[in-house]
Amino acid sequence: MSGAAPGKAAPGEGGRPRVRGSTTIAELLRRHPDGSARRLLAAIGVPCAYCGGAPREPITQAARRHGRDPGAFLRVFQALDEGWPADELIAAAQRKTDKKR
């Protein structure tokens, strides 16, 4: 059990809610004012930080839109809360899938 209230994400680093699949790109950018989310999006190879849909597009939808694994996107951005993600997590988020989920 995570200890989170029903319907709420378990706390992440610093007591803030954990990144979820429904977290929008804009929320990620605000969550990391040091620019690390923007750099991670660039490292993954997606221009989401500059998209007009960023305020309303969840990260899992962005992953599908770019032909990536939504679970890999979620894991890499959850890891960002604890520091720069491992190369393996970044590589998984970069990898294109054969089909859109």
Image (spheres, rainbow, N blue to C red):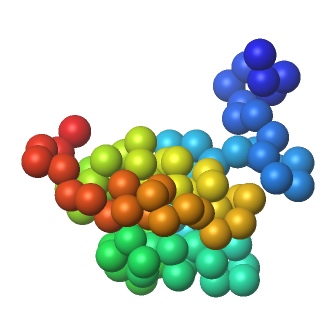
Which residue of the protein is positioned furthest toward the top in this rendering? 1
- Quadrant containing the C terminus is top left
Q: Percent from the top left, x then y, of residue 91?
A: 37, 62
Task: Note whether 68 is above or below 48 in the view shown.
Answer: above
Seen in the image, is 38 located left or right of residue 97? Answer: right
Which residue of the protein is positioned furthest toward the left in this rendering? 98
Q: Percent from the top left, x then y, of residue 57?
A: 42, 57
| Residue beneath the point at 74% across and 59% down | 82
Q: Percent from the top left, x then y, of residue 95?
A: 26, 59
Labels in figure, total:
0
Task: Note whether 14 is above or below 39 in the view shown.
Answer: above
Say whether residue 17 is visible.
yes
| Residue beneath the point at 41% across and 42% down | 71
Task: Note whether 22 is above or below 27 in the view shown.
Answer: above
Say whether residue 56 is visible.
no
- Quadrant containing the N terminus is top right
Q: Answer with the quarter of the image where residue 47 lies.
A: bottom left
Q: Answer with the quarter of the image where residue 11 lies.
A: top right
Seen in the image, is 87 located left or right of residue 2? Answer: left
Q: Percent from the top left, x then y, of residue 20?
A: 58, 43
Q: Nearer the viewer, residue 43 or 35?
A: 43
| Residue beneath the point at 31% across and 47% down | 69
